[in-house]
Image (cartoon, rainbow, N blue to C red):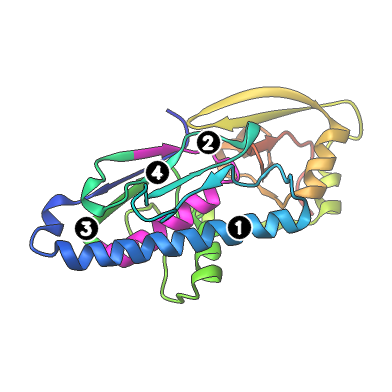
Amino acid sequence: MGYTHYYQVNKKAIQGNTEKLEAKYQLALKKCQAIAKAYNSELKAIDVKHPNRLSGYTVHSKPGQYGGLFINGTGEHAHEDFCLREHLKENASEFCKTAHKPYDQVVVACLIVLKHYLGPAFEVNSDGDACDWKDGLSLAKQVTKLKTLKVPKSIEVTSTCEREHLDFETAKKMLVKKGQVHTFRAYGSMLLGCDMDVKEVLKLIERYRVELSGENMARLDHKLALKDDKGWLFIECLGEAK
């Protein structure tokens, strides 16, 4: 299916507590609006047509009109809409496939905020692990100032969160000096192989934070990994980190 987040309202948990939880839901939506606005504003300050900007978001747009939440990326950085209904009870079993595109950070931030306010009444899961949710958590805390926010317990914690990041020169020494470099690109649960020019790989390493791959990819000699706008890229190496 591809990298996806899953969320739903626990109908049993809201019974007898609908009014109180609805108020919390509306507050959470306003927090999500602030998160989306802050994310967009920061990017537009760099470039009004920044490729990672949101295509649009609507929260409590006008009285009497749709007051839910709609978020997606722009152009090739768009994927599935992230939607929340105007009222809590209107939400069913939902999912949003972001494919790890940049707007995923905003989606994750909103899911964290919703879980914080609604507790057991809001169930969430993901194809990602707790490490994949770190950027969203950071964004949510930065904008809302809620220091007690955390990644939901339902999101798996794996050893991949203990990552060893490398500086540019160290990573460069691990690559072939010229020619083509084999890479694997992660698309959901699939890996697609591709040869890339070493100069293009170096540009990515210089731009994005690079780290050592996990054991499985290291066995295939793809010992470097980075996460760019398209998701995870695993890079073949000749040497070891020194």
**Which residue is under mark 2?**
99
For disc 4, the neighbor class at 10 Å (few under 14, some 14 to 19, many from 20) is some
**Between marks 2 and 1 in the image, the one whose residue lies nearer the viewer:** 1
Mark 2 or 3 closer to N-term?
2
Determine whether the residue tagged by mark 3 lies in a helix, strand or loop: helix
Magenta stretch encompasses residue 105: yes
Location of residue 85 with respect to 222 vertically, above or below = below
Per the image, the residue denoted by label 3 is 121
Indicate which disc, 4 or 3, sits on the residue closer to the N terminus: 4
Circle 4 sits on which residue? 83
**Up/down of 200 relative to 159, above or below:** above
Q: Which residues are magenta?
A: 95-119
Residue, disc 1? 39
Res. 152 in view: no
Amino acid tagged 3 = Ala
Q: Are marks 4 and 2 in contact (CB under 8 Å)?
A: no
The amino acid beneath tag 2 is: Ala
At x 36% / y 39%, what residue is drawn? 95
Q: CA distance from mark 4 to mark 3?
A: 17 Å
Q: Earlier in the sequence, mark 4 or mark 2?
A: 4
Mark closest to the chain's N terminus, 1 or 4: 1
Asked whether residue 123 is drawn in magenta, I would say no
Helix or strand or loop: what does disc 2 sit on?
loop
Task: Kindly report the distance in space between the C-alpha atoms of the residues bearing marks 1 and 4.
Answer: 17 Å
**Residue appearing at x 42%, y 54% in the figure:** 62
Q: Earlier in the sequence, mark 2 or mark 1?
A: 1
- Residue 101 position in % (x across, y down): 58, 40
Looking at the rendering, in which quadrant would you find the N terminus?
A: top left
